[in-house]
Amino acid sequence: MIYTNPNTYDFLVDLNKVADEASARNRKYAIIPDVPGYWVQSRQTNPLPIDWTQPVELGNRHLVDHVTNDLEAQRGEVTIIVQKVHAFYLADGFVPLGEDQYPVVQYARSHFTKTSETEFFELYE
């Protein structure tokens, strides 16, 4: 019973759809880089050691490597859900998410295979 704007609603409906599809295929899924609130009510626990793969939280190479090593360790078992737009700006519109400031996004896009995409997300395995 939380009210939101249409952009955020559409984004979250799309996220739920791709998460449900991954679950239906008996796959774990990780969401990057910035929907940490999703995990509060999720039926699945986050397979990554951090909910928010932002530069502030992953402020050095060691921390980034920890997350990317976890992704590699789960290769073949995890679907990586990568945002195409910044969640922060949803109230105002859709701002494309660049990978330059998100090393984990850059890693997923360059080391995993894109299997599909939706309006707001790309899926990698």
Image (cartoon, rainbow, N blue to C red):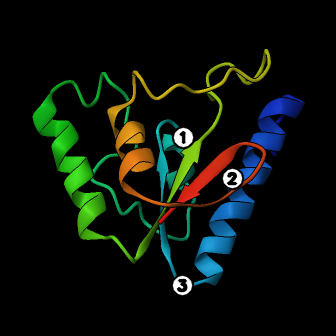
Left or right: where does residue 59 sit relative to residue 45? left
Which label number is shown at residue 21? none
Quadrant of the image occupied by residue 84: top right
Farthest residue in the top direction? 92
Question: CB under 8 Å between callouts 1 and 3?
Answer: no
Residue 23 at least partly seen: yes
Which secondary structure, mark 2?
A: helix
Is residue 3 depicted above or below 113 in this figure? above
Q: Where is residue 60 in the image (x, y as percent from the top left)?
A: 15, 26
Which label number is shown at residue 15? 2
Question: CB under 8 Å between callouts 2 and 3?
Answer: no
- Amino acid type at image mark 3: Asn
Is residue 36 depicted above or below 93 in this figure? below
First-in-chain label (2 vs 1): 2
Which secondary structure, mark 3?
A: loop
Which secondary structure, mark 1?
A: loop
- Amino acid type at image mark 1: Val
Q: How many dots with numbers?
A: 3
Q: Where is residue 54 in the image (x, y as percent from the top left)?
A: 38, 29
Which label number is shown at residue 26? 3
Taking depth in this image into account, of 2 and 95 the one nearest to the observer is 95
Q: Residue at x 33, y 70 (%)?
A: 75
- Amino acid type at image mark 2: Leu
Left or right: where does residue 85 sit relative to residue 58? right
Taking depth in this image into account, of 125 and 21 the one nearest to the observer is 125
User: Disc 2 to disc 3, how far (Cα)?
Assistant: 17 Å
Question: CB under 8 Å between callouts 2 and 1?
Answer: yes
